[in-house]
Image (cartoon, rainbow, N blue to C red):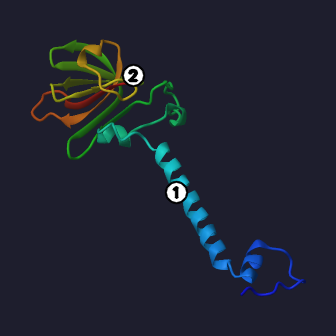
Amino acid sequence: MSKPIARHLPYHPLLYAYHIGSFWVVALLAGAVTLFLFGVLVFAHSLARPSQGDSSLFSQLYKVNSAHAAPAPLGLPSTTHLREMHIANNGAVFLKSTKITALSDKVLSVSMSWGSNDFLWTVRYSYLTSVLDKGGKPSNLSSLKVGDTITITGTLATGATEPTVEAQVIRKN
């Protein structure tokens, strides 16, 4: 049996629903709508995340948009590609925006300039090395040529007389 509605109460859907005995139905529907909207937000957020198809840890951690890159320090020219060089204490190496200066069988020579300083690296690659195009899709070593700008992840080679990287991933910039 429904309760009588007082004439002096202003019209409000929840108050009306309470008075006619269906308050819990309306509350349940409001909760369902809230959960649905929360699900839509979670789904939209998952679409904005980077693709999980690229299995390289470095490529997921070091995705940098050049439009948001820090400005060059005073006295150094800014470039279209942010250049980085990292060597971790476990031997992991990350070289971003290096130029290929020479190609030979299983070895690349790359360089990175910083002002008047040139950093030269030897990069060893094998059939285990993943080569990716600009979009992060698989490519092959034959697509690389002298003058290309690439990003390299790998490990520091032990026993080498010059800075040498055992490449795990080579990606064109």
Mark in the foreground, 1 or 2 = 1
Which label sits on residue 39? 1
Where residue 57 sits, quadrant-wise, is top left
Say which element carries label 2.
loop
> Residue at 59% of width from left, 64% of height from top?
34
Residue 27 at x, y percent in the picture: 63, 74
Q: 41 or 27: which is nearer to us?
A: 27
| 140 w.r.t. 54: above or below | above
The residue type indicated by label 2 comes to Ser
- Location of the C terminus (image quadrant): top left
Number of disc labels: 2
> Residue at 23% of width from left, 47% of height from top?
89
| 86 w.r.t. 120: above or below | below
> Residue at 18% of width from left, 19% of height from top?
107
Which label sits on residue 116? 2
Say which element carries label 1.
helix
Residue 147 at x, y percent in the picture: 35, 13
Question: How many C-alpha atoms fall within 10 Å of the one at disc 1: few (<14), some, or many (≥20)?
Answer: few
- Location of the N terminus (image quadrant): bottom right
Residue 15 at x, y percent in the picture: 76, 78
